[in-house]
Amino acid sequence: MPRYNILASLSLAALIGVALPVLAEDKPDPVVAKVGGLEIHQSELDVAVANLDPQLAQLPDDQKKVAALSGAIDVKLFAKDAAAEKLDQTEDFKARIKYLTERELHGAYFKKHVIDVVTPEDIKARYDKEVAALPKEEEVHARHILVKTEDEAKAVIKELDAGKDFAELAKTHSTDPNKDDGGDLGYFGKGRMVKEFEAAAFGLEKGTYTKTPVKTDFGWHVIKVEDKRIAPPPAFEQVQPQIRNLVMRDKYLELLSKARDAQGVEILDEALRKGYEEANKKQ
């Protein structure tokens, strides 16, 4: 998967986790509580629920609503007093409101032009592209019988040569915990097993077993390869959320690039400029 610049990735990750409740103009917006002469509407409660602390967001829905309402009431109580003291007229407050407004506009734009436009076809096409780019990795499906001595392993090989069933011999002779499964190790690729075991397993043809014992730090092995294949890609359903995020990331970066080209970005502080440019290099 390609790697993208750090700042854009962080922005995307943050936005994906942000709920952006939108009320239709004709949707009822009932009052759910009153604080003095101020009303708290359902729309305000929805925003409070969407912006709960991550720990509180894990609560059941009914408890989340209570926690959000409690927070909204606290906000109303202090907000009225703060306005009476003209705290909303300070330069620091105005700067913060300006930033928060622009951040919310950024989020609304992201939702409209990225989240809402991603289609199932976009996700499936990106999945197919990623699958096509995956390296072809060979896997083997193997069984083994693990014993303590070389002589024991040679005796097992003699029984195999005489026509005995490998899985049954594993149940009888193997000291490995998987002996009850006939020594079945399932499919594995290179780098998963110790080098001596791996070399022997990948050197066998399908349906054959080692004619000489294989020694590792675990003991002596007799190995049989049941099958060989190219590792299948992860199922679409398994990786669909990650692929969707990739599609959204690409759309976001495309929009961001166009906006930068159209509007320009000038950073006057030299140290900040270098840091910004470095962080935004595509690797």
Image (cartoon, rainbow, N blue to C red):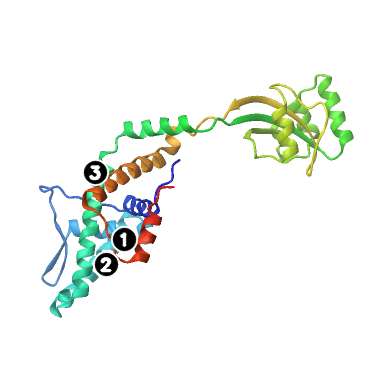
The answer for how far apart the CA atoms under marks 1 and 2 are is: 9 Å
Q: Look at the numbered discs 1 and 2 and tell me whether their residues touch, using CB distance below 8 Å.
A: yes
Q: Name the outermost residue toward the bottom.
A: 85
The answer for how far apart the CA atoms under marks 3 and 1 are is: 25 Å
Where is residue 58 shown, x and y percent of the image? Answer: 38, 56
Query: Label 2: how many residues lie within 10 Å, few (<14), some (14-19) or many (20+)?
Result: some
Quick check: can you spot residue 54?
Answer: no
Residue holding disc 1: 52
Q: Is residue 6 left or right of residue 193?
A: left
The residue lying at 24 percent from left, 71 percent from top is 74
Q: Name the outermost residue toward the right.
A: 151
Residue holding disc 2: 71
Q: Amino acid at mark 2?
A: Gly
Q: Nearer the viewer, mark 3 or mark 1?
A: 3
Give the structural element (helix, strand or loop) at label 3. helix
Q: Name the outermost residue toward the top.
A: 163
Q: Which mark is residue 113?
A: 3
Where is residue 170 shown, x and y percent of the image? Answer: 76, 31
Q: Look at the numbered discs 3 and 2 and tell me whether their residues touch, using CB distance below 8 Å.
A: no
Image: 177 above or below 22: above
Image: 14 above or below 220: below
| Of callouts 3 and 2, the N-terminal one | 2
Give the structural element (helix, strand or loop) at label 1. loop
Q: Which mark is residue 9?
A: none
Give the structural element (helix, strand or loop) at label 2. helix
